[in-house]
Amino acid sequence: MSRRVVRQSKFRHVFGQAAKADQAYEDIRVSKVTWDSAFCAVNPKFLAIIVEAGGGGAFIVLPLAKTGRVDKNYPLVTGHTGPVLDIDWCPHNDNVIASASDDTTVMVWQIPDYTPVRNITEPVITLEGHSKRVGILSWHPTARNVLLSAGGDNAIIIWNVGTGEILLSLDDIHPDVIHSVCWNSNGSLLATTCKDKTLRIIDPRKSQVVANNFEEPVALQEMDTSNGVLLPFYDPDSSIVYLCGKGDSSIRYFEITDEPPFVHYLNTFSSKEPQRGMGFMPKRGLDVSKCEIARFYKLHERKCEPIVMTVPRKSDLFQDDLYPDTPGPEPALEADEWLSGQDAEPVLISLKEGYVPPKHRELRITKRNILDARPPAGPRRSQSASDSPLSQHTLETLLEEMKALRERVQAQEERITALENMLCELVDGTD
């Protein structure tokens, strides 16, 4: 009698589970624009979602802890004159996010740690170089302030966000619309897919394709008959690829190995509601005490629902085999070092003690233009107590006062509305 040999893998029993209702983000008007991006970006501090907005494009940024119903007047990030098509958090600064728009521009924003009182309308910098809409963004994985954008003009532009300059422009490689772009782990190569059904591996600093159509795939996996766009998310720490179909209601996941058949089906997480988009949390934002190996943020029509992937373990101790050292927030290179030909692997961190995000860091923009140079500063004077930065206590006091004022204004607005309704009833009664 033959016995079936079961492949050994620590990820065979990974299971997905939707968060409880009180852990979701409710009453968010998710964008209805027709585009194939994820519409959602998340990091260990913030959740960002592209939303419906009149008179331009906008997205909302929420602290991860701000679950529940989102106030309809919650401040948005606005500034684009056309719909926002893609957003991406900087891997080296959790307060910096880039947005791409139908208005042909890319904007980079600094998000404060506190909740702003009104809409954020002024980006740190606006990057203009595309002649048609910009639909794809991707930060360099190891070099500081290096951002890639791809547009409807079939061009890829690589920017130095710190200066606003174009480092590289790849405008003669793709004959048709670019569908997706991603970096390899050290940012030395790009992989792109195009409407011409060709997969290209590109060395951006040489502006040339180093590998093109591959004759035979190493594995072929039949999915389903749906024509929805697949959003792939790959975790190099576990060698698991997650496939989320836009308009689908499931997440399929596979383990990638070096031996044939290379791709091994693990499981499928299914739910009732189709997904409008999906966010994928970086490994440093996961809860290692619960053996969480992936967390998704599923967009519904009017809410965002976290979905947690867990490996069942009996021990409460840190699971070294599930959490190898993973890329942290420190860049390994400066932009000019990468441009000159240097490569470096990501700077890794351990998750054994849990990840603590670094303090808020400003994104500094340096314009390399003599006209932008400031006049020399006058004679220095000693710093008085009034010149010193605000203490943490003072900042908290100001934030509390602002919160109280907002509540008072809202209460007055509700009182005015009630009085207006009473007046209308009185007028109608006299008629």
Image (cartoon, rainbow, N blue to C red):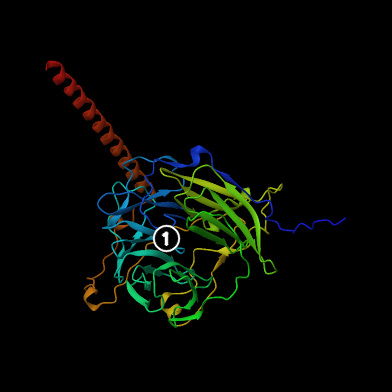
User: Between residues 42 and 163, which one lies in front from this camera angle?
Assistant: 42
Q: Is residue 44 visible?
A: no
Q: Residue 392: where, in percent of width, then height? A: 39, 50
Q: Nearer the viewer, residue 152 or 60?
A: 152
Q: Residue 189: where, in percent of width, then height?
A: 50, 75
In this rendering, position of residue 42 left or right of residue 85: right
Q: Is residue 11 left or right of residue 189?
A: right
**Residue located beneath label 1 in the image:** 88
Give the residue furthest to the left: 431
* Residue at the limit of the structure toward the top, as seen here: 430
Quadrant assignment for the N terminus: bottom right
Query: Which image quadrant is residue 137 in?
Result: bottom left
| Camera-side residue of 354 and 290 | 290
- Secondary structure at badge 1 equals strand
Expressed as whole percent of the image width and height from the top left, the position of residue 182 reads: 48, 68
Quadrant of res 207: bottom left
Looking at the rendering, which quadrant does residue 294 occupy?
Answer: bottom right
Q: Nearer the viewer, residue 97 or 1?
A: 1
Outermost residue to the front: 225
The amino acid on which the numbered mark 1 sits, given as a three-letter code, is Asp
Q: Count of labels shown?
A: 1
Q: Is residue 104 above or below residue 353?
A: below
- Residue at point 17%, 23% (across, down): 424
Label 1 crowd bin: few (<14), some (14–19), many (20+), radius 10 Å: many
- Position of 185 with respect to 92 (left or right) is right
